[in-house]
Amino acid sequence: MRQMTSWAVIAAMAASPVPAAADIGRPSAADLNTLTVQDWNGTAVPGDSGVFAGEPIVVAQQDQKQEERRAKAREERQKKNQAQQNDQKKQQRQAEAKKQRQAEQQKQQRQADAQKQRQADAQKQRQADAQKQRQAEAQKQRQAEAQKQRQAEAQKQRQAEAQKQRQAEAQKQRQAEAQKQRQAEAQKQRQAEAQKQRQAEAQKQRQAEAQRQRQADTQQQRQADRAQEQRREAAREQRQQESNQQRRENREANQAQEQRREAAREQRQQENNQQRRENREANREQEQRRENAREQRQQENNQQRRENRQANEAQEQRRAAARENRANGGDRESLRQRMERDRRTEQANRDQDRRQRLREERRQEIAREQRQENREEARRRDRREEQRAAAIRDRREEIRREIRQDRRDERRDWVREEERRRDRYRDWERDYRRNNNWERAAWAGLGVFAGAAIVAATTQGRTTYVVDGRPLIVDEYPERFYWRADNYNVRDLNNGWTESVVIREDGSRVVTVIDNYGVPIRRYRVLPGGQSVTLFNNMPVWWGDDSSLDVDVGPVNVGIPYDRYIVEPSRAPVQVVYDTVTAEPVQQLDRAYTLNQVLYNEDLRALMPRIDVDTITFRTGSADIDDSEIGSLETLGVAIEEAVNANPSEVFLIEGHTDAVGSAESNLTLSDARAESVAQILTEYFEIPPENLVTQGFGEQFLKEDTAGDSRINRRVTVRRITPLLANDDQIAGLEDQSFN
């Protein structure tokens, strides 16, 4: 029985699925509890529950099902693992594709950059080739001229040799004649040499005379300069005398004005004292009348009380008499007398009532007269007050006129002083440029414009350059910078640049660093406390490609309302003007720019909201602003003044524009003059430091109204804040390695 059971177990195990390699040699719990276990001697040992003939087969079937389930589970895990591996491979392929696209994009970007670099190198190479070509052509021209010179000399040499040959042949034929001929030729040679000597001496004489003439011209020019300087000095002294005379007149006028004011104050004091006396007198009279009325009413009341007492006493007597008559049986006579007394009493009462009414009417009449008198007195006071108010208004108007006159006088004195300062600066600039050959090089082919600039015109220190067909006006130091200046000086730096310093009345200094071609490189202000405020930096030429004037900022996305992007002060609220003066760019900036780049690129300026000043009107062909329109700039001036006081490094661009009437060159100059006029008013009337204002004329390039005719809208000035656009840090400017000592 045990042997059959063992063979059944073996058969069931053979029929069951082969276990996994990991399961071989590891019996399950069922095997331990139900299967017959063979010991090492071949003896079968039954389990705890006993062994029966059909039990191993059942156990084997259960193990087979369990193994099937395990196999299915393993297949499912394998499928799941395979799916996860497929997903990971798919994600890996997607990541590799994304990296491939990024690499291709970077490669395309590098190719585009390389293409731009190659184009730039090609442009530079073409320019260098053109320069070499011109130099080669010039060299060829010189060589050709030298060749012609050598050929001419060789021709002369050959002719001389042929002449000598002929002379030799003639000498053989005619020895006597040859001797004479040699003597004649020698004589001619001596004469030729003497002629050359005389010509050389004459040439030296002419050169000496020319030198003496140049020296005389130079001396004459110096004398003319000295005479002109003397005339200017005399004119300055004359202006100084006129200014002193004007100041004396102003002081006298101020003294007279103060005397008039003192007399007016005394007159007003006397009028006030007289008015107070009249008021006190009127009050006393009114009080007297009131006292009299009170006394009269008191007397009337006393009289009335006495009459009432008398009437009461008479009535009491009549009553007593009546009682007596009734007691005595009275007669008709007594009754008649009593009736007569009653009648008289009644009459007396009526008279008393009438007198009472008359007294009341009199009191009312007196009250009416008093009220009428009070009204008349009030009218007289009102008329006096109106007269005094009119006198005060007239006096205030007179004082305003005097103040305006004083301001005009002060402005005239200031303008004269500014003219003297500008004359001194022009004299210094003329001498400096004469001694150092300041105008030996324009920007054409040099400096930040890298050969693309053409000098178009120079007017009053402002030079117009045309860069790639677009004009740009540059002024190294505008005349309005001498506002409230006590002194100024210029010194040369060790790298060939210059440093101009203007010292203001409050001790602050405005410093401008200018390169050797007149380009303002840096401008900063040193406050009285020693704090330095950088206003702008222009990139030097060693910056490379970032110093190019033409920059591409892409399309400008204006995300604010149009009336907040282009503000017109005549229509916009005051707060909107204030907000625009301190507005930020309409989109994020990725870098800072130089001042010349801001002036050159309209798309770059379009990143900042602007104010179109429509409260002033420019006449055609004029940059003058009428005095009556200066007040219309108050909102803009006060807003800029507050912004500069809050942040001294603020910079505002004032753009001048014209209509399309006239030539482009004249309109460019006119628009620049209009921008300067507005900047001058903002400085003089609203005390905005001139170094915080940058002016630029654009002529007829940006018409607001698309018309070729006369247009008031196009004759305008635009103001915008450009501080966020400018590079104003020393490290950004590339100046930290430069020695300016």
Image (spheres, grey):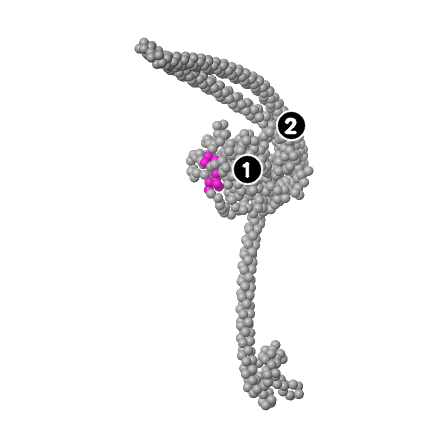
Given residues 628 and 459, the one toward you in this image is 628
**Badge 2 local density, few (<14 within 10 Å), some, or many (20+)?**
few
Q: x, y percentage for residue 735?
A: 64, 42
Whether residue 285 is situated above or below residue 81 in the rendered picture: above
Placement of the C terminus among the 4 image quadrants: top right
Structural distance between the alpha carbons of marks 2 and 1: 51 Å
Whether residue 373 is situated above or below residue 9 in the rendered picture: above
Which disc, if any, is residue 150?
A: none
Task: Tell me if residue 242 can be seen.
Answer: no
Give the residue at x 65% y 40%: 164
Q: x, y percentage for residue 437?
A: 62, 34
Label 2: state its secondary structure.
Answer: helix
Q: Amino acid at mark 1?
A: Phe
Q: x, y percentage for residue 467?
A: 54, 41
**Which residue carries the number 2 mark?**
215
**Badge 1 local density, few (<14 within 10 Å), some, or many (20+)?**
many
Whether residue 381 is situated above or below residue 544 in the rendered picture: above
Label 1: state its secondary structure.
Answer: strand
Q: Residue furthest front?
A: 328
Placement of the N terminus among the 4 image quadrants: bottom right
In this picture, residue 577 sits left or right of residue 338:
right
Given residues 223 and 530, the one toward you in this image is 530
- Magenta residues, start to end: 562-571
